[in-house]
Amino acid sequence: MVRFCPPPAHCACTRRPRTSVGPSPGMTRRVTLELLMLWSVVTSSALLLSPPRSALVLSPRHLPVAMLRNAAADITEIVALGEKLQIYVDTEEEGLGSVWAEATVSSIDSGSGEFMVQVTEWASLARDDPAYEAAYEEGPFTADEEGEEWRRGVEPWDPGRDASGVRVGESLQIFVDTEDEEVGSVWAEATVSSIDSDSGEFMVTVTEWASLAKDDPAYEPAYEEGPYTAGDEGEEWRRPASGAPAKAPAPTTPSPQEAAAVAALTSAAARLKRCGIDGDENEWPQLTAAVEALYDALSNDGQPIATDQRLVGDWQLIGCTSPEVSRRKGLTGLGAAVFTKLGALHFSYGADGSAVARETLEFFGKPVILNELRGTFSCSADGRALQEKYTEADMGGQQSTSVFSGTTSTLTASLISTDGTLRIGRGPDGVLVFRKLPPGGLAAWLDDKLLPTDGGTYLGNPSWKGPIERAPQDLR
């Protein structure tokens, strides 16, 4: 349970066709102009929104968790976007009264420091559970209310290792007693959910039987166990043999309901321009409905993202209904610059916990700018939310800038379709849909667009020839 105006077109019919093999004077002037403007982009921060802080801090309220934010950008802020908290809520039940409910920070007012949260305490229950309640927004909250209206009740996510020798989100196996005389004790799959930074002790969420169909007699929802220590390794807990995941591979044959939902979602995403952020608001309801249908189809069979090995690889954002992402025309906000449009957004995850976000920007309709953000990823205690933390970026033609250092991107309710082709996630103001690329597919796409396959578009990148590569041969 979880407790982020174009230049005028050149009309060919207004000019007489030329028989010359070389470029026309008009074409030469246009290419030269484009090269000069592109050169200024990759050799300076000309397209960076000034000051740099504006590229990180989003407008107050309704901030999409897929957008990036520097939690230290404003001294008035006391929490970080995506941080897990608990808030005091009235359950309206006489026997239960008021309780501390799990929530996630969804937006922060950069002026006042007030923040809103998404209450998720009951959102991960089965929808036919009487206690189920969809995630909802609550707030605003202030610093003065800490301890009374809200508290930091859950350890913050930490993708780094500490004295325990394990990592939050890492898959392990723990030795448990099944209370079945014939079965006895077994090694059960679990995921590290929290680590005590002082003692090194850690807790795990046991997920061995949580991915079974709920009508399966062996089904058991995920539950927490621990604490464990580094000294317990080999007796109370162990790492999966040969580094292989403890869980058997996810099924590859979807149910008829899921197959129909995947087809509907693929169709809805195909109608979007630039993943839905370029004037496609009228298509958002259909995309949202298709996403919700896929959630329903995966309600029994969806594997927690923390234990789903299919996350590793390259993904392209193909659908987005976030008004904020649409306003910013992408991830960093640079897509809103003059003569610039978003080309594509790709996200890559490594088996070592690394995360890379690539934002391709089109300049005069050509994909020529690549902003690359690098960091790590981790998962929430219940394995359903995915968080990326970035430490450096090649952006706006500058190599390894620290402008995005410490920023995080969080998506809740992250699930991958049974066939592994689609990944969906929720944000406070929209849903997001990603398509899995085949091995080598992203590298081939970047190479075809004359973009670097490693790092961003900055002069000196050995995997990029620079703006001159786009010029006609006789202009080089």
Image (cartoon, helix red, strand yellow):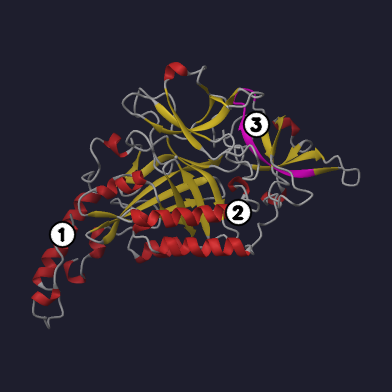
Query: Which label was assigned to residue 298?
Result: 2
Can residue 345 be seen at all in this image of the molecule?
Answer: no
Q: Judge depth for marks 2 and 1 and give the one in front.
A: 2
Q: Residues within 10 Å of mark 3 (few under 14, many from 20)?
A: some
Circles 1 and 3: CB atoms closer than 8 Å: no
Please state which of residues 305 and 396 is positioned toward the viewer in this rendering: 305
- Give the structural element (helix, strand or loop) at label 2: loop
What's the CA distance linking mark 3 and mark 2? Answer: 34 Å
| Residue toward you, 60 or 182 | 60
Q: Amino acid at mark 1?
A: Pro
**x and y percent of residue 412 in the render?**
52, 42
Tell me where residue 197 appears, x and y as whole percent.
59, 26
Residues at marks 1 and 3, CA–CA distance in whole angstroms: 58 Å
| Residue at disc 1, secondary structure | loop
Q: Tag 2 or tag 3, which sits nearer the N-term?
A: 3
Q: Would residue 6 be seen by someone viewing this image from the given angle?
A: yes
**What residue is shown with label 3?**
164
Direction from residue 159 to residue 249 in the image, left or right: right
CA distance separating discs 2 and 1? 46 Å
Q: Earlier in the sequence, mark 1 or mark 3?
A: 1
Residue name at image x 37 percent, y 34 percent: 61
Report the residue marked by disc 1: 7
What is the secondary structure assignment of the residue under circle 3?
Answer: loop
- Above or below, 184 against 202 in this view is below
Magenta stretch, residue numbers: 187-199
Amino acid at circle 3: Ser
Residue 159's spot in the image, x, y percent? 54, 37
